[in-house]
Amino acid sequence: MAFESFADFLAMGKHGFYVWSAYGVSALLIIANMALAIRAQGQVRQRLARQQRRDTLGDSEQ
């Protein structure tokens, strides 16, 4: 193992704050990107469902 203890691993040779904050920001951005994509997918599905209901109602009137 490159580090003598778990505390040394967390300290990352005195660069721990930078390293772990970079991991944290990256994880936060990935999670936010996934959440926004899921939200957008839901909005598209709702829009398509509304459009399909509108088209079905329009076809039944004819």
Image: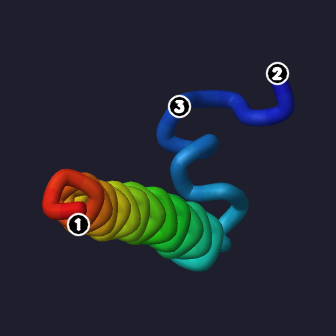
How many numbered marks appear?
3
Q: Which badge, 2 or 1, comes first in the chain's sequence?
A: 2
Q: Secondary structure at mark 2?
A: loop
Which quarter of the rendering shows the C terminus? bottom left
Closer to us: 34 or 45: 45
Task: Give how far across and how far down residue 41 sits, in percent.
Answer: 41, 59
Closer to us: 56 or 1: 56
Q: Are marks 2 and 1 in contact (CB under 8 Å)?
A: no
Q: Secondary structure at mark 3?
A: helix
Q: Amino acid at mark 2?
A: Met
The numbered mark at residue 1 is: 2
Whether residue 18 is visible here, answered yes or no, is yes
Few, some or many C-alpha atoms within 10 Å of disc 2 (few <14, some 14-19, many ≥20)? few
Task: Give how far across and how far down residue 49 sits, in percent.
Answer: 27, 55
Task: Give how far across and how far down residue 26 sits, in percent.
Answer: 58, 68
Whether residue 39 is visible here, answered yes or no, is no
Q: Quadrant of residue 19?
A: bottom right
Closer to us: 43 or 16: 43
Residue at (39% x, 66% y) in the render? 44
Label 1, on which residue?
58
Which quarter of the rendering shows the N terminus? top right
In-image side of 39 versus 34 (left or right)? left
Q: How is the image coloured?
A: rainbow
In-image side of 23 versus 13 (left or right)? left
Q: Amino acid at mark 1?
A: Gly
